[in-house]
C-alpha cells in the first residue's frame, strides 16, 4: 500500500470539489486536493473525536503551539506561540483579516503572478487594488521589479506585499538571499509583508523552506500558515497567523469573530498531523517526487512541445503549452481530451498558454491524464 494508490473507482466516490465539479467522463487533475490515503494517526484522531462526540469549541493555544514546535524542529525557526501567533479560520480568510486589521481598505497590495488565483478574488473582495510584479521566466521573484513597485513606480505606493512562499503554481521556493532582499526592500519602503506559507511543509530536500520571519532585517511581516495543504485537511479548516515582533501586539488584537471561527476538528486533526504525521508526509513527498519524474518522462515521450520544469515545492506541475499554439490549452484539454487541469489564465499575467496539473495522485492517473492530453491534439 502506498499513499497515492487509490484507484479511480475509489476516488470517484468522493464528494469534494475536485471529484464533483466535472461529469464522470472527465479525469480531474486540477484543484489542490490530494488523492491520498489519510495519515493513519490523523484519521484515528478524527474518528476518535467523532465517536466520542468530542466535537465542541476549541480552547487554548494547541494549534499555535504545535506550529511553533514544527517550525523549530523542521525549519529551525522559533517564534513565541503566545505573544506572536493567533488562530484564524483558514489561510485566505486569515490574509484578508490581517490586511484589514493592520491596514486600510483601498490601499494597494503587490502580488507576483502567475500565482494562486484566489489571491485575485480575495483581494478584490477585500477592496484592495492589485499591483502585479510578474515572476521571472525561472519562476523567481523579480527583485528589481519589486523595488520599483514598492517605490511607487508601478502605480500608487503599495501598503502590503502578498508573497506566496513557496510559490503556487511553479513550485519554486525563494532562497534566504532572495527573502533577505525582499525584507530589506519592504523595510526601506514601509511595505508590510504577508507571507502565505501554506505549501511550506511540501518542500523537497535539498531545497529548504525559509519562513519569512526567520530572515534578517524583517520588520513588519505576518506569516499565514496551515497544515491543511500538506496533510490534505482543507475540509477541516484551521490556520495560524504569526506576526513579527514589531507588530505582534497589534496582531493579537484580532477580534474574536475571526479567532473564534477556527474549527475544533480542524485543530484536533492539524495538531495531530504536525506532531505525529511527519513520517506519513515524508512518504507522501517521496511519492510526489517520483510523480514529478514520471510526468517529465511522459511529457518527453508523448507531448514533447509541453515544457515542464519540475519544482522543489508543492505537488503542482506548471506546464508551459505555448509551443502547441493553442488559444486556450486548458479548455482544449477539457473539451477534447476530457481531462480537467487548472487553466493558466486564472493565475494572472504570465499564465496564458499554461495549465496546472495536480501530481498528488495515483501515477496511473497521471499517465492517463497525459494520454488524454496528447490524444486531444490528434
Ligand atoms: C497558496 C495558497 N494559499 C491558500 C490556499 C487556500 O488555503 P485555505 O483553504 O486555508 O484558505 C491555497 C490552496 O490551494 C494555496 O495554494
Image (cartoon, rainbow, N blue to C red):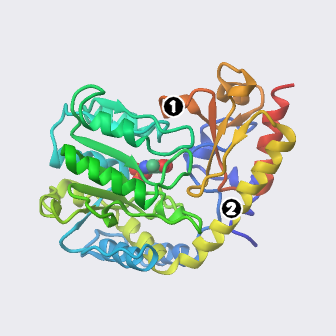
> In the structure shown, which secondary structural element does the residue marked by tag 2 occupy?
helix
Q: Which residue is drawn at 72% across and 21% down?
A: 325
Left or right of 266 in this view: 35: right
> In the drawing, does residue 301 fall left or right of residue 204?
right
User: Which residue is tagged 2?
Assistant: 289
Instruction: Name, please, the residue furthest toward the top.
Output: 327
The answer to whether residue 163 is seen in the rendering is yes
Observer-nearest of 222 and 22: 222
Q: In this view, does 174 lie to the left or right of 125?
A: right
- Rendered location of residue 280, percent (x, y): 60, 74
Q: Mark 1 points at which residue?
A: 346
User: Cα distance, mark 1 to mark 2?
Assistant: 26 Å
Q: Which of 185 and 329 is in front in this view?
A: 185
Q: Relative to residue 375, is residue 219 depicted above or below?
A: below
Give the residue drawn at x 21%, y 51%: 187
The nearer-to-camera label among 1 and 2 is 2
Q: Which residue shows up at 48% across the image and 57% down it?
A: 199
Q: Is residue 90 visible?
A: no
| Pointer 1 local density, CA inside 10 Å: few below 14, some 14–19, many at least 20 | some
Percent across and percent down for residue 173 are 50, 55
Amino acid at each position: 500500500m502506498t499513499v497515492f494508490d487509490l484507484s479511480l473507482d475509489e476516488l470517484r466516490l468522493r464528494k469534494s470539489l475536485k471529484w464533483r465539479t466535472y461529469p464522470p467522463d472527465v479525469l480531474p487533475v486540477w484543484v489542490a486536493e490530494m488523492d491520498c490515503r489519510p495519515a493513519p494517526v490523523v484519521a484515528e484522531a478524527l474518528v476518535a473525536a467523532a465517536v466520542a462526540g468530542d466535537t465542541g469549541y476549541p480552547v487554548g493555544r494547541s494549534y499555535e503551539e504545535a506550529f511553533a514546535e514544527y517550525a523549530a524542529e523542521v525549519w529551525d525557526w522559533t517564534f513565541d506561540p503566545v505573544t506572536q501567533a493567533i488562530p484564524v479560520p483558514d489561510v485566505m480568510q486569515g490574509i484578508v483579516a490581517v490586511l484589514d486589521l493592520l491596514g486600510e481598505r483601498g490601499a494597494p497590495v503587490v502580488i507576483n503572478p502567475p500565482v494562486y488565483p484566489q489571491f485575485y478574488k480575495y483581494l478584490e473582495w477585500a477592496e484592495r487594488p492589485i499591483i502585479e510584479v510578474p515572476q521571472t521566466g525561472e519562476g523567481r521573484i523579480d527583485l528589481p521589479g519589486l523595488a520599483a513597485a514598492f517605490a511607487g513606480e508601478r502605480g500608487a505606493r503599495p501598503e502590503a506585499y502578498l508573497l506566496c512562499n513557496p510559490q503556487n503554481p511553479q513550485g519554486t521556493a525563494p532562497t534566504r538571499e532572495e527573502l533577505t532582499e525582499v525584507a530589506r526592500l519592504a523595510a526601506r519602503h514601509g511595505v508590510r509583508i504577508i507571507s502565505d506559507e501554506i505549501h511550506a511543509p511540501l518542500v523537497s530536500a535539498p531545497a529548504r523552506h525559509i519562513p519569512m520571519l526567520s530572515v534578517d532585517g524583517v520588520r513588519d511581516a505576518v506569516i499565514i500558515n496551515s497544515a491543511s495543504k500538506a496533510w490534505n485537511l482543507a475540509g477541516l479548516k484551521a490556520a495560524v497567523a504569526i506576526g513579527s515582533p514589531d507588530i505582534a501586539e497589534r496582531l493579537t488584537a484580532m477580534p474574536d469573530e475571526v479567532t473564534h471561527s477556527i474549527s475544533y476538528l480542524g485543530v484536533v486533526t492539524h495538531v495531530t498531523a504536525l506532531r505525529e504525521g511527519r513520517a506519513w508526509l515524508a512518504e507522501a513527498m517521496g511519492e510526489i517526487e517520483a510523480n514529478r519524474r514520471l510526468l517529465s518522462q511522459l511529457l518527453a515521450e508523448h507531448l514533447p512541445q509541453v515544457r515542464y520544469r519540475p519544482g522543489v515545492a508543492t505537488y503542482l506541475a506548471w506546464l508551459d503549452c505555448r509551443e502547441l499554439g493553442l488559444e486556450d490549452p486548458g479548455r482544449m484539454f477539457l473539451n477534447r481530451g476530457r481531462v480537467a487541469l487548472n487553466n493558466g489564465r486564472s493565475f494572472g499575467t504570465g499564465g496564458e498558454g499554461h495549465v496546472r496539473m495536480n501530481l498528488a495522485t495515483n501515477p496511473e492517473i497521471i499517465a492517463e491524464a497525459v494520454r488524454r492530453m496528447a490524444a486531444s491534439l490528434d
